[in-house]
Image (cartoon, helix red, strand yellow):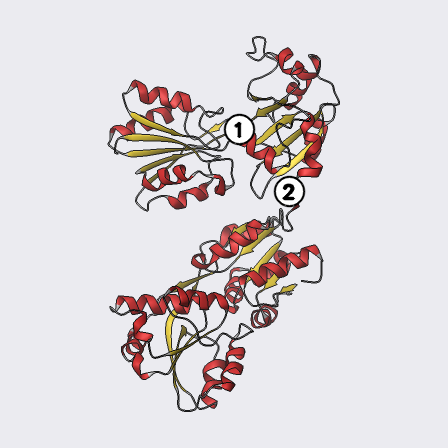
Amino acid sequence: MKNKVYLVGAGPGDTGLLTLKGKACIEKADVIVYDYLAAEELLKYARKDAELIYAGKKGGDHTLTQDRINALLVEKAKQGHTVTRLKGGDPFIFGRGGEEIEALVEEGLDFEVVPGVTSAIAAPAYAGIPLTHRKFTSTVTFITGHEDPTKKDSSLNWQALAENSGTLVFLMGVKNLPNIVNRLMENGLNANTPAALIRWGTTTQQQAVTGTLDTIVENVAAAGLKPPCIIVVGNVISLREKMKWFENRPLFGKKIVVTRARAQASDMILQLTELGAHCLEYPVIKTMPPEDFSPLDAAIDRLADYDWIIFTSVNGVAFFFTRLLEKGKDARALGSLHTACIGPVTAERLKAYGVNTDILPKNFRAESIIEAFKNVPVAGRRMLLPRAAQARPILPEELSRMGAVIDEVAAYHTVRDTENAAPLLRQLEQKEIDLITFTSSSTVTNFKELIPDNRFEELLKDVTIASIGPITSETAEKNGFTVHIEASAYTIPGLCDAIVAYYVNPGRG
């Protein structure tokens, strides 16, 4: 339906907590108006032609005033657009969603509210704090932390809050923390009552500080905690040491640079994030179609002439089949060919096109395929090798020595991606990066070219380097990197396992 506004709770920060209905509203929107606390990663679900409008508000810095946001929703809806208003947490838990709806109602505009997971519940849960527990309390109270507790005509009943035996949750109250604590104790709440602040709850930047009403202000100041935070007060906080799970993950808080091409980075980022890492996506290469399609096209036109086709990477499979389909053919064109793949992920991608691999070596590098072919008749066999332009020559050279007739064609090529050079250098300068991952020799060489030679040693000092395998490690060392971690299985899961092993048992990655 056109001419409708959806108020969608974006959740507390972990993008996995977005509801399915919320995702659908993002996908169909003509216009998306989003907040500071609504994760920008959710915008990947938006249509390419959707208008994206940032309306963030943080710490008194308002990109748009609330009145202007209200007017904007009305204006866009009256223009006939489907509008999704993306709000952090839940639209109605101190989210001013009610004010936005009132503006829509006054103009007779259709709207729908899609609740979201509020940080008031999610942040404590990720910090190991159950807001209710039958051994402690069966009540919980949500309170705005924005109101100045010292003002004469406070709308909060501080005596009732202090006498409440349940859990108290203050949202957006870091600046008012000393006043909140004082007002609670002045009204009779015991100074030894546990208290906790949770910053950026549910994200890989989550930070929790605990104490009592008597100590929490000092503890928060010592930790340098800043907004956005929620404040929890109550005896349930004593369960945190037993129940915390999110911060116990092996890579929690580690800032890890992912350098592989954006199109292939998602699996790696997902795995590292699940292990607790804060991934910084700085691709240094882009995969592109070949500059000249004619060699690949010629090979596709005479597929029946080949005995084998060998895929050395997921990219090789993807670009080959894209061109195959563009030429009006499909997997049936490979019907008489035997296939070989380097790595299980490459084999899985091939299987997605309906083709199983006949050879999958135990070790995932070109040399292992050569070893596997030693037990296969090779002499006189025609083999097609669609892969990256300027790839390592060892595979076609060795197979040729064994008597095979090799047609090596460029299915794609890689180019340097310099788009993220400035923010990457800035984070290296500020010593905000713990680890850099390299998944190919080209990621190494392209990354090295982004770093000024006279600053290489300074910027990379104390940064851990992780390599997917010996070929990549060799390239890294030739370029001046010290490789601390090398995967024993030359795959993304193998690299992630090696990184975990390094941090769990330092020096053994």
Quadrant position of residue 380:
bottom left
Position of the C terminus, as image quadrant, is bottom right
Q: Residue at x 70, y 16 (%)?
A: 189
Three-letter amino acid code at the position of disc 2? Trp
Q: Residue 360: x and y, percent? A: 49, 74
Question: What mark, if any, has residue 243 been given in the picture?
Answer: none
Q: Secondary structure at mark 1?
A: loop
Left or right, 63 with reference to 253: left
Q: Residue furthest front?
A: 134
Three-letter amino acid code at the position of disc 1? Gly
Asked if the residue under mark 1 is in contact with the one under mark 2, i.e. CB atoms within 8 Å, the reply is: no
Q: Pointer 2: residues within 10 angstroms few (<14), some, or many (20+)? A: few
Relative to the observer, which residue lies in front, 248 or 199? 248
Q: Secondary structure at mark 2?
A: loop
Q: How many marks?
A: 2
Question: What mark, if any, has residue 59 been given in the picture?
Answer: 1
Instruction: Find disc 2 in the rendering and name its residue.
Output: 245
Relative to the observer, which residue lies in front, 493 or 177? 493
Q: Residue 284, relative to residue 304: is it above or below?
A: above
Q: Pointer 1: residues within 10 angstroms few (<14), some, or many (20+)? A: few
Q: Residue 421, relative to residue 287: is it above or below?
A: above
Residue 437 visible: yes
Residue 413 visible: no
Left or right, 377 with reference to 505: left
Position of the N terminus, as image quadrant, is top left
Relative to the observer, which residue lies in front, 322 or 174? 322
Question: Which is in the foreground here, disc 2 or disc 1?
Answer: 2
Q: Residue at x 57, y 13 (%)?
A: 156
Left or right, 395 with reference to 230: left
Q: Residue 115, relative to residue 285: is it above or below?
A: above
